[in-house]
Image (spheres, rainbow, N blue to C red):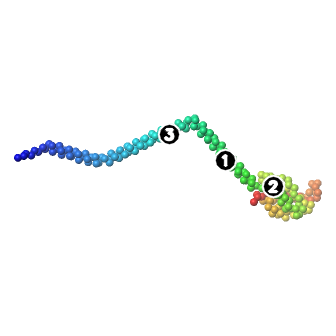
């Protein structure tokens, strides 16, 4: 008859080994996600650290390049050129604005003077220009006539001739006392109108 041998020690060792393996597997199943998270964080930190180190090296190189005299001279020159260009553009803009203002301001030309003369020619009025202020556009002149001047009609004629924006007269006098031929004089101060 065959004898069965029971080796309890071997069974105990196998059971203990199986239990340890089960415990180890349970521990690994529980610890694996945490270990993966820690490994991922360490990997991310390492990437950030490496990127920061590379950026510091680039920054150091850029600072060295900026501090180099060979590079500073052209940069300073370009700044001076930019300032000169800005000043030129500012002066150009100013000149253009002054030119446009002057272009809109009336010029005292012979055609305007003829129109002023023509306003009083029907009533025998002659005009003697005394002053012109180009800054304000004010023209001063004397209108003289051998007969008494119809002031309101003459002022309306000057306003309607299209030359003036404002017509004022400052006095009316007889020219007999001034050693001139008998007649009458009207002192006028008129502001030229802007051309349309």
* Image spot of residue 173 (x, y percent): 89, 58
Q: Is residue 169 visible?
A: no
First in sequence: mark 2 vs mark 3: 3
Quadrant location of the C terminus in the rendered image:
bottom right
Q: Nearer the viewer, residue 57 or 134?
A: 57
Write down the quadrant of residue 87 in the picture: top right
Instruction: Spot the residue most to the front.
Output: 1
Q: Pointers 2 and 1 in contact (CB under 8 A)?
A: no
Instruction: Spot the residue most to the left.
Output: 1
Label 1 CA crowd tier, 10 Å (few <14, some 14–19, many 20+)? few
- Residue at 51 percent across and 37 percent down: it is 61
Image position of 100 with respect to 149: above or below: above
* Image spot of residue 158 (x, y percent): 82, 61
Q: Could you tell me how many numbered marks the image carries?
A: 3
- Residue at 74 percent across and 55 percent down: it is 104
Q: Secondary structure at mark 2?
A: loop
Which of the numbered marks, if any, corresponds to residue 89? Answer: 1
* Image spot of residue 113 (x, y percent): 84, 57
Image position of 160 with respect to 49: above or below: below
| Residue assigned mark 3 | 59
Q: CA distance from mark 2 to mark 1?
A: 32 Å
Label 2 CA crowd tier, 10 Å (few <14, some 14–19, many 20+)? some
């Amino acid at each position: 008859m065959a004898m069965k041998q029971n080796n309890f020690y071997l069974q105990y060792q196998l059971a203990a080994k199986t239990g340890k393996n089960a415990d180890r597997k349970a521990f690994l199943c529980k610890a694996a996600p945490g270990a993966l998270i820690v490994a991922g964080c360490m990997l991310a930190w390492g990437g950030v650290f490496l990127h920061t180190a590379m950026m510091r090296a680039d920054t150091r190189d850029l600072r060295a390049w900026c501090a180099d005299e060979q590079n500073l001279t052209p940069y300073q020159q370009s700044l001076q050129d930019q300032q000169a260009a800005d000043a030129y553009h500012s002066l150009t803009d100013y000149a253009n604005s002054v030119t446009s203002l002057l272009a809109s301001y009336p010029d005292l030309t012979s055609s305007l003077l003829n129109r002023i003369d023509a306003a009083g020619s029907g009533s025998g009025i002659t005009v003697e220009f005394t002053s012109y202020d180009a800054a304000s556009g004010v023209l001063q002149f004397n209108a003289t006539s051998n007969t008494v001047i119809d002031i309101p009609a003459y002022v309306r004629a000057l306003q309607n001739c299209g030359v003036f924006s404002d017509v004022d007269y400052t006095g009316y006098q007889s020219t007999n006392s001034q050693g001139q031929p008998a007649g009458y004089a009207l002192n006028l101060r008129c502001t030229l109108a802007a051309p349309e």
